[in-house]
Image: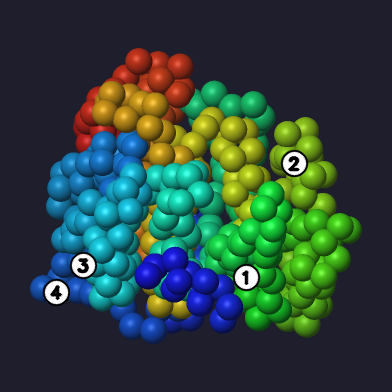
Amino acid sequence: MLSKAIISTARTALQQRSATTLAAGFPKVASRLPTKYGGVYTVTLIPGDGIGTEITDSVKQIFEHVNAPIEWEQYNVSGETAMGESLLIEAMESLKRNKVGLKGILFTPMDQQSHPSWNVAMRQQLDIYASVVVFKTIPGVPARHKDVDFAIIRENTEGEYSGLEHQSFPGVVESLKVSTRTKAERIARFAFDFALKNNRKKVTCVHKANIMKLGDGLFLNTFRNVAETYYKHSGIEYNDMIVDNTSMQLVARPQQFDVMVMPNLYGAIVSNIGAALVGGPGIVPGCNVGREYALFEPGCRHVAKDIMGTNRANPAAMILSATMLLRHLGLDSMANNIANSTFNVLQSGVAKTADMGGQATTSAFTDAVCKNL
């Protein structure tokens, strides 16, 4: 049922507030405000698979410590089995009610007979079209380069992730990449608006239009048209770069990038390069936003089943994603308090998890953040 809905989908600002880089200052364009009763916001929580439960428990502990006005509607959805589809639908209904959610990563099996990605399904079904991930070197975290600070804006709902595949002849598979001018324009304008709101100076369109002249050509030409029509006199520079050259340039000289906008598949690949540049997926927060809903999750979508249940995961990415959620709700002071405490723990090295060369546990890192508040 859900897979049919995905295929069907594939075929077919309110008040603005100044934001810091990690605030991911996107336009607040929800048609109505998130659900709030008696001064408390109701937020959908999907811990996810792998280390999801451990790192979302960190968020819950910190929120309880600061008495955050958040009430969780938790759904323990798992992508490990197709039996969880009914619970996923319940979680999506909860998100429709609450307008905002915090989510870990759901496992996607590679077996051809298994269910499609439920991570993708949620974004497509709810039209959460823009993925925002900020990559920034943090003092105290080992990194391959200094002074890295760029954002990736990724189109979430089409491209190679359309889910339209079939076997036309035994041993011959055709996968359709869907590109539309409407969604290309929407994500391009989002990227420029993000740059303006966060005092960024340049937007780079990443593509492969030299080979995919129609699909990526449409994305690139739409980007150029948006830049010329709406942002020519905004002070924002713009350029474009082929995705394979982008990968090399990121590794060689990442400081040249500021805001990058790209189709779905390239965003998945380039985001992982970005994470490796600044210290790994454990410190990179992210969010997914649309006109109606906002869903916050770690910027690099890893389940990390290899360390599941070992209390060794770095919860910083999930904690920082949760602070972005708080900012989205207008709770800026509380968000800044938690974010500053998290950065202090990372910088001081008092609770280095394994990914940062230490031996601290997830619990120890969380306790250190609470202690610093």
Kind of residue at disc 1: Ile
Expressed as whole percent of the image width and height from the top left, the position of residue 101 reads 32, 62
Disc 1 to disc 2, C-alpha distance: 21 Å
Disc 1 to disc 4, C-alpha distance: 33 Å
Q: Is residue 256 visible?
A: yes
Report which residue position mark 2 lands on: 247
Kind of residue at disc 4: Tyr
Most foreground residue, 49 or 369:
49
Q: Residue at x 68, y 76 (%)?
A: 180
Q: Is residue 17 visible?
A: no
Q: Quadrant of residue 42?
A: bottom left
Report which residue position mark 1 lands on: 187
In the rendered structure, the answer to whether residue 60 lies left or right of residue 316 reads left
Report which residue position mark 3 lands on: 41
Q: Nearer the viewer, mark 3 or mark 2?
A: 2
Q: Name the quarter where the N terminus is drawn.
A: bottom left
Q: Residue at x 86, y 66 (%)?
A: 213
Report which residue position mark 4 lands on: 37
Q: Name the quarter where the C terminus is drawn.
A: top left
Q: Residue furthest right?
A: 210
Disc 3 to disc 4, C-alpha distance: 6 Å
Q: Secondary structure at mark 1?
A: helix
Q: Nearer the viewer, mark 3 or mark 1?
A: 1
Expressed as whole percent of the image width and height from the top left, the position of residue 266 reads 67, 52
Disc 3 to disc 1, C-alpha distance: 28 Å
Q: Residue furthest left?
A: 38
Kind of residue at disc 2: Ser
Q: Earlier in the sequence, mark 4 or mark 2?
A: 4
